[in-house]
Amino acid sequence: MRVHDLLKELREEKAAKIVLLVADGLGGLPLTPGGKTELETARTPNLDALVRDGTCGLSTPILPGITPGSGPGHLGLFGYDPLEYRIGRGILEALGIHFAVGARDVAARGNFCTVDAAGLITDRRAGRPTTERCAAMCEKLKQIRMPGVDIFVEPVKEHRFVLVLRGDGLGDAINDTDPQQTGHAPLEAKGADAASHKTAGFVNRFVAEAGRILKGDPPTNMVTLRGFARYPKIETMEQVYGLRACAIAVYPMYKGLARLVGMDVIDDLKTLPEQIQTLENLWPKYDFFFLHYKYTDSTGEDGNFPAKVEMIERFDAEVPKVRALKPDVLIVTGDHSTPSKLSSHSWHPVPTVLWADTCRTDAVTEFGEAACLRGGLGQFEAKYLMTLAIAHAGRLGKYGA
Amino acid sequence: MRVHDLLKELREEKAAKIVLLVADGLGGLPLTPGGKTELETARTPNLDALVRDGTCGLSTPILPGITPGSGPGHLGLFGYDPLEYRIGRGILEALGIHFAVGARDVAARGNFCTVDAAGLITDRRAGRPTTERCAAMCEKLKQIRMPGVDIFVEPVKEHRFVLVLRGDGLGDAINDTDPQQTGHAPLEAKGADAASHKTAGFVNRFVAEAGRILKGDPPTNMVTLRGFARYPKIETMEQVYGLRACAIAVYPMYKGLARLVGMDVIDDLKTLPEQIQTLENLWPKYDFFFLHYKYTDSTGEDGNFPAKVEMIERFDAEVPKVRALKPDVLIVTGDHSTPSKLSSHSWHPVPTVLWADTCRTDAVTEFGEAACLRGGLGQFEAKYLMTLAIAHAGRLGKYGA
C-alpha cells in the first residue's frame, strides 16, 4: 500500500501548526578522522535546547549511498518518495521563476553561451552576463514563433533562462544540447520516442533561430538547453495531508519545489530575518510552514568549513523566534549533507530534530551528527518525516480497529 | 525503482580500489548473558585501528530473524537483493567446481550413498569415500546416456558430486531424492510443473541406471540428489557497478558465487597469506577485490569458541598488509553470524566496518558486536553495503537536480 493512500485514509482535521526548518546541506564531515563536523563545531545553544526537549535522528534522503539533488532531497522531506516522483530540472527551473507550467508543457533550462565564428563554444556561461542583459536577450528570443507549438522564453539569472514549449503530444526524452565543454558546437537535440522526436524538431529550430537573432550580440550570442522535462502529475500536500502549506524560501529552485506540491509560495524574500518575519506574519493563515535556509549548503559547496559553521550559528540565532510562535511540531533538518570537505552534496545521513509535546525525549543534548546517532528517531528514510510530523500534530487516526 | 537500475544510471568512472574482506560467519554470541562474543574476546589491534578511522554498523544479511545460507549471505554483500535472486544449491555446487553451467542447464548436488540388498540407505555419505574414489565412480556414471538430454557427472569432494542435465524446456521444481535418514530408499523425483515433470523423468531414469552401474561397488553403490536448480539470470558486477571484480577465495562455494556475479576467480589458493599475496599481485588489475576467509565460520560451526577467537586473531594479523595497499574503500564484514554457542549460522546482525577518506567517523573504537551498535552505519541491510562502497569510492553521481 502506498503511504500516501494510507495517510489520506487516516488523516483527521485538527488545528495544529507544523514548522519544517530546512537548513540546506546541513550534514557534514570532520576534516580529519575523529574530528568535529561543521554542525558539531558550531555554537548552537538554541538548537541544543530544542534537541534536549525533542527527539533526534539521522535522515537518509534517498537510500544508503545515494546523493540527492535538491529536487529529490526536498520531495523526500515533503513526504513524497523521491524514487517514485522524478522531477526534471527544466520544470524545477520554470517553477522557480513562477512560470505557470502546466500539463501540456515541456520545459528546459537554457544557458546563454559564447560561440566563435566557427560556431564552437568558447564560454559555456557567456561570461556570466548581468541578469538585466539576460532579460534583454530573452526579449529578443520571444519573437521566435513556429506553427504547432507555443514558445515561452523567460530570464532566470545571469546566463540562465527557461524555455517552455507548450503543445499537444510533446515529449521530454531529449538529450541536453550543452556539450559540457568548450571547443565544441552545441549538440543537436534528438528525441528517444515519437513525441520527443517531434519536440526535438521544435527545439533544433528554436536554437537555429536563436543563433541567427543573437549573432550580433557577443558574448551572449548562442544558447544551449538542458534538463528537458514534462510537468509531473503529483498530488498537493493539501490533497495528501489535508494541510494548508506555505513556503518561505529565497531561492527559485526551492520555491518551485514547494509550488509543485501545492504550497503557497511567498515572494520577494532576501534574508533569514525577513523569512522569520514572514513566518510570524503568516502564522494564523497556514497549518504547515516550510522555511528554507540556503547558506549552509552554498558554503559547504564552496568547501568553506568556517563559513558553514558561521551560517549554522546564524541559523541557530533565529530558532528562538520560531519557538516563540509555539508551533505544535517543529522539525529542523536538511535535504542532504554538503560536507565542506567534499565541496558537494553527499549521501551521508542528515542530523534531524523533531520537537513536539508528544515526542519521546532521548539522551541527546546537542545537535550534531554523532549525537543524533543516539537519538530516538534512529536512522530513518526522509520520506517518513512528514508522517511523523502529522502524527505528532494529532492529525492522524488509528490504522485498523 | 530497482536499486540496480538506479546505480546503472548514476554510476561514474573513477579509478578507485574497493576491498571487501569477508570473514565468514563473523558475528557471534556470548556464551553467558553479558559476556563477550568471539570477536569481542579476540585481540584485534589492527581491526580496532581500522574501526577508529572508519564507520561501523551491524549488517542484517536478509531480514531480521532470517538466517542465511552462504549463497544469500554473499549475494547480499555483493549488492544483490537475496530475496530477489535465489540461487539453487545445485548451481552453486556446479559453479564451485568450475563447471561451465549455462542457460539450458538444471544442476543438482549428488551424494554417493550406501544401500542394502533391499535398496534401503544404510549410510547417506557412503562412509565418506576418498575424493579419488568419488572421481572413479563419476567416470562410471558418465556412460549414462538418454535421448532428449545431455548428462554431465562431475566429482566434487568425498561423497559429493554434481549432476547437470542440459536440454530445452527443463525445469527445476523437483524434490530432493535424499530421504535425509537411513532405513529408507531414495525418494522418487517428482516435478511440480510440466517442464519439471519431464525433467524428473530424466532424473529417475538416471538414478535407476546409476543404481544398476554401481551395484557391485559398495559402499558407493547408490546416489541421492538434492537442490535441483536452473541457472539464474543475474547481471554481472561490471554490468551493475562498472567494476572489474575479482574473487580471492579458497573454497569452491564462494568461488562459484563470485563467478555467478561475473567476478574473475583466482584458483589454487590454500591459505590466508597466499590470498593476501594474491591480492597484492592483482592490485593493479581490478577495481574490486572480494577476499573470503572461511575459518571464522567453520570454527563457529564446530562450536569451538576459543578456536573461532584464534581464527579472528589470525585474520586480524593480515589486515595491515591490506591497508598498506592503500585501498580507497576497505570493508570488513561477514556474510552472516555463526555463533559457537549455536554451532550453526544464525540471523544475528554482523559487525561491519567501512573505511574511506570520506567516511564520517563515529565513537566506536573497537571491533565488536556491542561496539558496532553505536556506529554511524547503524543497523543496515547488507544489500546496501555495495552502494555505500561505490559512493565512498567516488563512483556514484547525484540523483536528480
Image (cartoon, coloured by chain):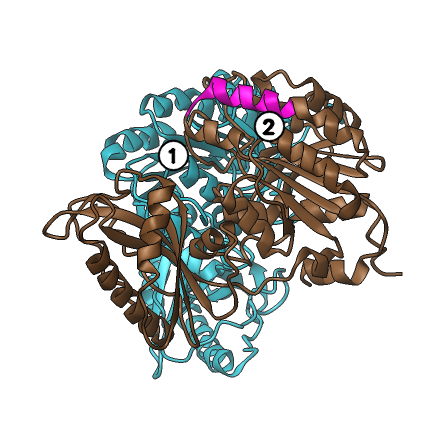
Chain colours: A brown, B cyan
- Measuring 31% from the left and 65% from the top, which residue is drawn there? A144
Q: Is residue A9 left or right of residue B297?
A: right
Q: Secondary structure at mark 1?
A: strand
The residue singled out by tag 2 in the image is B375
Give the image location of residue B268, x and y in percent. 29, 40
Q: Is residue A227 visible?
A: yes
Q: Are there few (<14), some (14-19), or many (20+) residues within 10 Å of tag 2?
A: many
What's drawn in magenta, residue-wise?
A303-316
What number is the disc on residue A34?
Answer: none
Please identify, in this view, whether the residue under mark 2 or under mark 1 is nearer the observer: 2
Same chain for marks 2 and 1? yes
The residue singled out by tag 1 in the image is B19
Q: Secondary structure at mark 2?
A: loop
* Chain containing the residue with disc 1: B
User: Residue B290's quadrant in the figure?
Assistant: top left
Reading the chain from its start, which is encountered first: label 2 or label 1?
Answer: 1
Give whichever of B347, A168 is nearer the camera.
A168
Q: Magenta span has A310?
A: yes
Give the image location of residue A271, x and y in percent. 57, 31
Q: How many marks?
A: 2
How far apart marks 2 and 1 lie (CA) works out to 20 Å
Q: Amino acid at mark 2?
A: Gly
Q: Are there few (<14), some (14-19), or many (20+) residues within 10 Å of tag 1?
A: many
Q: Is residue A287 left or right of residue B143?
A: right
Give whichever of A213, B169 is nearer the camera.
A213
